Image: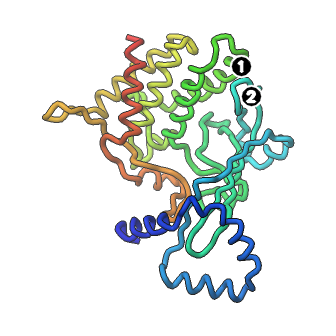
Amino acid sequence: MEIQNEEKFIKGVESLIDPMEVSNILFFQKLKRLLPSKIMKRFLYSASKKTPYIGFAIDPYSLFLFFRLSNIDYAKSLLPDRYELAKSRLFDDDEPDYYMGIGNLNTRASTFWGTRQEVYLIATDKKTGLLYHAWDESKQMYWANPKTGQSPNFWSRAIGWFGMGILDSLDFFPDNHPKINEILNIFISMLDSVIKYMDKKTGLWYQVTDQGGREGNYFEASASCMFLYSISKAINKGFINKSYKKYADKAFNGIINELIKIEDNGIITITNCCQVAGLGGNNRRDGSFEYYINEPVIDNDRKSTGSFISACLEYEKLI
C-alpha cells in the first residue's frame, strides 16, 4: 500500500468512530449473531468491494484488567526454559507478586464490531536479564514465537521506559515505605543487565539491545538517554552507590560526542532517533531484528529530545 493511500485509509476508518455511538456496540454484536451465515458472508463480501483493505479502530472506552496469578506453575509452563516470571505490583502498598494482564479492546470498522482480547505475562530472560517486548498467550500473532508466544527481540527504548517509570514512580513514595527495597531490587537487576550491553567504546546502547555487532544495528538516542537518566537519578536518590558513576560519565560523553551536533544557527540537534516501533498492525510489525533496524531513523524525535533533557538535568547533579 502506498503511503498516501495508507494515510487516507486510516483517516477514513478513524472517521467512522463516534464516541456517542459506543453504547450501540453490544446491540450490533447481538444483531450480527442473529444474521444467517449466508447473509453475513454476503454483507462482508459487499463491504470488501468498497476497499481492498481491512482495518479497525479501537473505541475510546476499553478495559484493562490485571489479576494475581493463582496457578504460577502453569504460567511458568507457558514460558520457554530461558525465561522466568517477573514480579510486579499494581499499587504502592502492594506486595510484589505475579500478575496477568488482560486487555479487552472494543473495535469497530465498516464491516464488523467486536472485542479483541490480549493477554500479557511479565517475564525476564534468564540468559540476558533483559525484558522482552511482548508475549502472546495464544501464540497466534504473527510476531510471536509459535512455541513460546514471546516476541523475538529486546528493544532498548522499551527497557528504557521501564527504568524511568520505576524511578519516577518512587518520587511519590514516602522514604520509609516498606516496599521500596523490593522495587529497587527489580530496578537494579534490570539496570545491571542493561549495563552489560553498553558499547565499551562509545558508552551508548544499540537499537536492538543485545545484538551490537550485527550489521545494520545502530546506536539509538532515546534509549541511550533513558539509560543515562536511570543511572544518574538512581545515584542521586541514593538507590545505587557512586561506583555506577563511571557508566553515567561514559554514557554522557558518548551522547555528546556521537549523537549531538550543533547546527550553523546554534541550534542543538540530537541524531539517531528511532521514530517509532511496536508490534502488530497491518504493516507487519513482526519484532524481527530487520523490523527494528528498518523503522525510520530521524533527528530530534520528541522521545529523544525529552529523554536527553531529562538525562542532562539528572547528570548535572553528579558533576
Farthest residue to the front: give it: 20
Mark 1, residues whose alpha carbon is within 10 Å: few (<14), some, or many (≥20)? some
| Residue position for label 2 | 96
Give residue 163's quadrant in the image.
top right
Depth check, front residue: 58 or 21: 21
First in sequence: mark 2 vs mark 1: 2
Give residue 138's quadrant in the image.
bottom right
Depth check, front residue: 205 or 318: 318
Horizontally, residue 17 falls left or right of residue 203, namely right
Q: Position of residue 182 (x, y in %)?
A: 70, 21
Q: Position of residue 247 (x, y in %)?
A: 45, 20
Query: Which residue is located at x 58 percent, y 45 percent?
Result: 133
| Residue position for label 1 | 179
Using the rendered image of the protein, determine whether residue 220 is visible from the camera's viewpoint: no
Pointers 2 and 1 in contact (C-beta within 8 Å): yes
Q: Position of residue 279 (x, y in %)?
A: 55, 54
Query: Which residue is located at x 37 percent, y 40 percent?
Result: 302
How are the residues colored? rainbow
**Element type where label 1 sits in the image:** loop
